Image: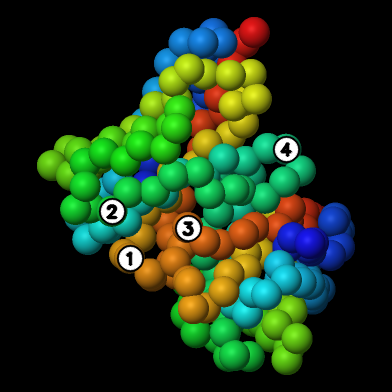
Amino acid sequence: DAGVTQSPTHLIKTRGQQVTLRCSPKSGHDTVSWYQQALGQGPQFIFQYYEEEERQRGNFPDRFSGHQFPNYSSELNVNALLLGDSALYLCASSFERTYSTDTQYFGPGTRLTVL
Amino acid sequence: DQQVKQNSPSLSVQEGRISILNCDYTNSMFDYFLWYKKYPAEGPTFLISISSIKDKNEDGRFTVFLNKSAKHLSLHIVPSQPGDSAVYFCAASLINNNDMRFGAGTRLTVKP
């Protein structure tokens, strides 16, 4: 049983560009959350998707957007990249019926570097 | 605004001894607290949690203590094992609120 998978593993972009990160949830999971972990800090909640809709959002600008597909996989899009967007982006999945923050399973993350 | 703080970036203990990791929070509305462990190149994995109606929760070698008046929680690992070496994050939220607030993490090294 594959856990949460994310692609790509690493990514290098330049300021002003746009980026798309992908996440496949653990088998049987239908809810996907995205987190940003800057160097030396803990993860920060970006948003959560359930039933293909954004259910809750953290304190991130509109440059950060997402999508969830019918197969429950998800994408995180960041427009107009800034140097400060350089971070590890983590995806976490869970099953709505048993949802609580401690039943989330995290992927290994995508390391984004903005030059 | 850092609402959850882990003031010790690193901790080193001898195998078999107790590891104590500390965490402080500022928002008195938080009512659910969690600890995650993270190995290199892996995502965080849930370790143990506690709700604000309790002051202690135990799971095997891991015990979390919550002091609501001091807005402080700690994770005790007894006995510590080399495989416990990892970065530990504490997190806080309202129950079933997706917006968890994480501390910056403490790197624990358990020496054989």
Mark 1 vs 4, N-terminal side: 4
Distance between mark 4 and mark 3 Cα atoms: 20 Å
Dot 4: chain letter = B
**Quarter of the picture holding the C terminus of chain B:** top right
| Observer-nearest of B90 and A87 | B90
Residue in the image at 45% along x and 28% along y: B61
Q: Determine which residue is flagged by label 2.
A: B51
A107 displayed left or right of A8: left
In this view, the mark in front (2 or 4): 2
The amino acid on which the numbered mark 2 sits, given as a three-letter code, is Ser
Q: Determine which residue is flagged by label 4.
A: B40
Distance between mark 1 and mark 4 Cα atoms: 29 Å
B79 displayed left or right of A62: left
The amino acid on which the numbered mark 3 sits, given as a three-letter code, is Asp
Residue in the image at 35% along x and 60% along y: B93
Circle 1/circle 2 CB separation < 8 Å: yes
Q: How crowded is mark 2: few (under 14 residues within 10 Å), some or many (20 or more)?
A: some
Q: Which mark is residue B95?
A: 1
Q: Where is residue B21 in the image (x, y as percent from the top left)?
A: 41, 28
Q: Above or below — where is B34 with respect to A49?
A: above
Q: Can residue B50 be seen in this view?
A: yes
Same chain for the residues under marks 1 and 3 in the image:
no
Circle 2/circle 4 CB separation < 8 Å: no
